[in-house]
Image (cartoon, rainbow, N blue to C red):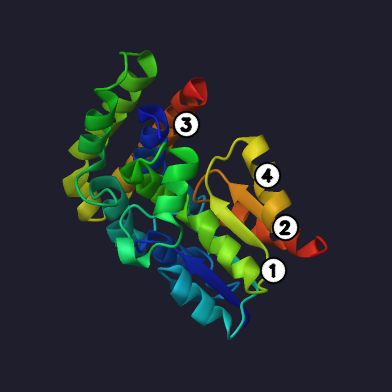
Amino acid sequence: MSRLLVVEDGGEYEEFARLFLAERWEIVAAHSADEALALMRDGAEAMLIDLRFERAPKEDLIGDVKGMADKLFAGDEARAARWLKEQQGTLILGALREAGHHQPAVFVHDFPPRRLSNLRKLYGRVGAVRAFDAAAIVRTLEGLAEEPV
Amino acid sequence: MSARAALAHDVGKYIARIARNVPAGGPFPSALAPLLAKDLYEAPGGGRPSARFEALAAALPASDALDEARAHLAAIDALEGAVREADPAACVEACRRALEVERLLRGLAGEGA
């Protein structure tokens, strides 16, 4: 059975995936970019990624706090750190793409259309569903799988 | 993140996680009751969803949507004992209300976007 990589800071996505998606995929779960990259060495067919990593320890986060503070927040590192937590899922997806993992990825988030379009420009086969809806997640990932890399 | 968006995310999204995926028709699967209870009474990051709702809603002007969501959350809290005992009717009712909370808070977030 092919694998679905779940990436999140807590345990809610994994629990959900094991309950409602395990008939379709073997579920493997990571809680940081490093863990996700390590698991992807053994491959996965698709990815289910949490956007916000508010519960993640600072040392597990990727992203340049200082650089982001200078670029977007007039040097305010606290705001930059908060932003990195709120966007951590996209940063992890970026790291996975950079490492050559271009599998379909889906977020459970109500992205504005323009934001999703920008994510697709940056990261290719990316989708979003508005709620924890197992059928919609399967449909979205299967649809993305049909798209060219 | 605005208070409206945080309500939709922290309360609406997670409270409906199991509720949205309960198989349609037939009795409520008792194996899902503990996970439903977790969604309804334990918000990610700690506390109850109803308490998280109140904390976030305090920053917003009163509205019908907030009042409706508050009423659903109060009803969900009142069902806690029965949900934790996996009473099928209570679980179905709590699911219905959880989906309403999600819908209302998503709508509120959309208004503020």
Q: Which residue is mark 4?
A: A118
User: Residue B20's x, y, as percent?
Assistant: 47, 47
| Residues at marks 2 and 1 on the same chain | yes
Mark 2 surroundings: few (<14), some (14-19) or many (≥20) residues within 10 A: some
Residue labelled with disc 2 = A124
Q: SS for tag 1? A: loop
Q: CB under 8 Å between callouts 2 and 1?
A: yes
Q: Residue type at mark 1?
A: His
Quarter of the figure with the N terminus of chain B = top left
List x then y, in percent, for residue A105: 62, 61
Which of labels 3 and 1 is toward the front?
1
The chain ID associated with circle 2 is A
Amino acid of disc 4:
Asn
Q: What label sits on residue A102 in the rendered view?
A: 1
Residue A6 as seen in the image, left or right of residue A96: left
Q: CA distance from mark 2 to mark 1?
A: 7 Å
Q: Position of residue B59 (x, y in %)?
A: 27, 22
